[in-house]
Image (spheres, grey):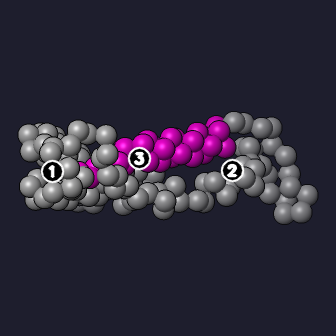
Amino acid sequence: MDLISSRTIELTKLGMDGLMDRQHAISSNIANVMTPDYQRKEVAFESQLSEIIEREDLKDYIKGQNSIEYIPPNVDVFTGEIHKYRTPTLQEKAYLMSNTMDDYKPQYVTDTFSGSNIDGNNVELEREMMDLAKTGTQFLVLSNLEKKQFSELSTVIRGQ
C-alpha cells in the first residue's frame, strides 16, 4: 500500500470536493430564494463515488488473486525466470494501470420536480437550510477522517 496516496485520502478528497460543490449550489439557491422563475440546483456525486469504490475493490481483488493464487513453479523459456504465482492477463494489467478517479465530476442538476411558488421559484428556504446543515456535517465527518489518516501517516514518518 502506498502511504502517501492511500485510497481513503483520495476518496475523502473526492467526497469533500462533491460536498463543496453542493454547498455552492445550496448557497446559490438561498441567494435566489426571491428571484422569479429561479429553479433550485442540486449536486449529485454519490453514485460516482460508489462506482469508483467498486472499481477500486475490483482492482484489490485482481491484485489479491495474482498474489495469492499459487501455481507450481515453472521456468520461463525465454527469460529463465521462475513463476510461482498467477500472471495477470493483459486486460487485468490495463485495468490495474487505469485511473478510476479521472472521470469523477459532480453533476449540477436543476430540480424541476419540486413545486413552484406563484412566481415560478421552487426554492424552500427551510429545506435549503437543512441541506446546508447536513452537507456541513458530512464535510466535517470526511475532514475528520482525512485528518486521522494524515495523523497516522505523520506518526509513521516520525517513527513513534
**In the rendered view, does 57 fall on the left or right side of 50?**
right
Q: Which residue corresponds to mark 1?
A: 119
Element under disc 2: helix
Residues in magenta, as a range:
40-68
Q: Is residue 140 above or below residue 94?
A: above
Task: Tell me where residue 66 appears, x and y as whole percent.
Answer: 66, 43
- Residue at screen point 37% across, 49% down: 45
Give me the C-alpha separation between circle 2 and circle 3: 22 Å
Q: Is residue 122 left or right of residue 82?
A: left
Q: Which residue is mark 2?
A: 92
Give the amino acid at mark 2: Glu
Give me the C-alpha separation between circle 1 and circle 3.
36 Å
Question: In this orientation, which residue lies closer to the viewer: 154 or 92?
Answer: 92
Which numbered disc flags the more N-terminal residue, 1 or 2? 2
Q: Position of residue 103 (x, y in %)?
A: 49, 59
Q: How many marks?
A: 3
Q: Nearer the viewer, residue 53 or 87?
A: 53
Q: Amino acid at mark 3?
A: Leu
Q: Residue at x 11, y 53 (%)?
A: 33
Nearer to us in this view, 95 or 40:
40
**Crowding at mark 3 (Cα within 10 Å: few <14, some 14-19, many 20+):** some
Q: Position of residue 89 (x, y in %)?
A: 75, 50
Depth check, mark 2 against mark 3: the one in front is: 3
Earlier in the chain: of badge 1 and badge 3, it is: 3
Q: Secondary structure at mark 1?
A: loop
* Residue type marked 1: Asp
